[in-house]
Image (cartoon, rainbow, N blue to C red):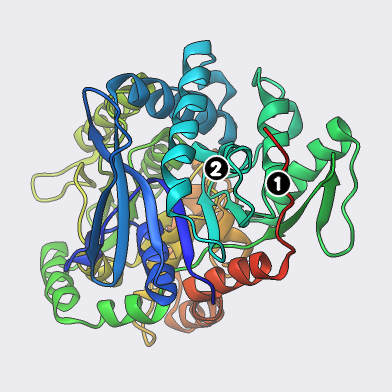
Amino acid sequence: MSRLVIISNRVSAPTSESGAQGGLAVALSAALQESNGVWFGWSGEETDHYTGHINFQRNFGVTTATIDLEAQDIDEYYNGFANRTLWPLFHYRVDLAEYERGFAGGYERVNARFADTVVPLIEDEDLVWVNDYHLIPLGQKLRDRGCANRIGFFLHIPWPPMRLLHSLPSHLALVTSLFAYDVVGFQTEDSLEAFLDYARHQLDVEVDAEGFVAYQGRTVRLIACPIGIDAVEFRASANGPVAAEIHGQMVSSANGRAMIIGVDRLDYSKGLQERFLGYERFLASQPQRQGGVFLLQIAPPSRADVQSYQDIRATLDELSGRINGEFADFNWVPIRYVNKGYPREELAGMFRAARVGLVTPLRDGMNLVAKEYVAAQDPEDPGVLILSRFAGAADQLTDALLVNPHSPEEIADAIAQALAMPREERVARWRPMIANIEEQDVLWWRRRFTDALESVQPAAVSAS
């Protein structure tokens, strides 16, 4: 395949402890290793004055190229427009979205800086793959600078319904900028249809049978392409020595109790408050289960500079304390709430030790934790996945116990059902889920997207 130039907001250089990387980092690293490509983006570091200097590194088969950003860039582009405007809006939380001109200006400025800096790195035959909501206008800015390569864009989070998107002052410019790409990928058919609904009503366009949409002389192919995990690697991790040691520790720590596990970044979209309330309802309605089960919730903090993230942390601290205070006994605590992250090899051992995996986001583009939980299970004695209907993964993992995360009663009932489920039913539910995860893994995702990108005709570049 052609060389890939992958562009994302952050770059996470592979390390010898690759398990510390998130799902997206693992997915992109695998694609780059296969294509001998380059991964470009922000280093995560701050500089006093933006210079455009690129720091090149090569680690474990992946070449990375990173830039530092000024404090104003980070405040307006990242903390501002990306995470206080687009993130809540795209996750259906219009009530939390903040609209400030300074945020929008910083978003445009940083996208322009990305374009100026990365253009010299792009060779004639390269495929350019832009990732996620931070960089929606980047394709148009690359075209404005003469880039005629095939350029694709993949959105890792949900695309919101038209009526919600209308609340964004710059919604029309944001949507039309996507027509600078040759391929635009979404996690689910639901997100793709939401985009098309906007395009039909606001731009008066139609889609053909192969997913192509034309607007003002530009044609883009739209595809639904759910991201997967490296299922083979993760299952191997779950059977490895690190996971085995952690599994043994968790079994010993559980002391005969059934463990329920949740692993989520600390974010209001993950439904953690609703999850705690559902678990509380379970404890109250199943008094005979008290003392025989516990919830391990791992929730590493993120975006600590954004007020809404400070608020959710304070809420969860209060909730976990109240639930433990109400139900705990001298030798049992119902919630173990941990604000730190763990390497993937260790998480694999925790997943295997858990009788129930609780994945209940209010809205999620995909949610790879659901897939990792399933992949980590013992085929002879698997646990049960409880999954939100509003996670993209619910379209694929239909044999999970699907719940409405807004309903404490549904969560409580699903926990009770999962804990009582006989082994035969657990195995019968697990097998089709692991088959899907192994078939539509991260390599399938990458090939589906890059094959679509390679199959289109290169764009004609108009003058800026």
> Which of the pair 336/26 is nearer the observer?
26
Which numbered disc covers residue 363?
2
Q: Are marks 2 and 1 in contact (CB under 8 Å)?
A: no
Q: Left of 310 or right of it: where is 226?
A: right
Q: Where is residue 90 shown, x and y percent of the image?
A: 58, 35
Q: Residues within 10 Å of mark 1 (few under 14, many from 20)?
A: some
Q: Secondary structure at mark 2?
A: loop
Q: Which residue shows up at 72% across the image and 50% down it?
A: 192
Label whose residue precedes the other's in the sequence (2 or 1): 2
> Which of the pair 52/386 is nearer the observer?
52
Instruction: Name the residue furthest bottom.
Output: 380
Q: Left of 273 or right of it: where is 452?
A: right
**Residue 115 higher or lower than 221, as above or below:** above
Q: Where is residue 293 shown, x and y percent of the image?
A: 27, 57
Type of amino acid at the residue the image marks with label 1: Val
**Residue 297 higher or lower than 272, as above or below:** below
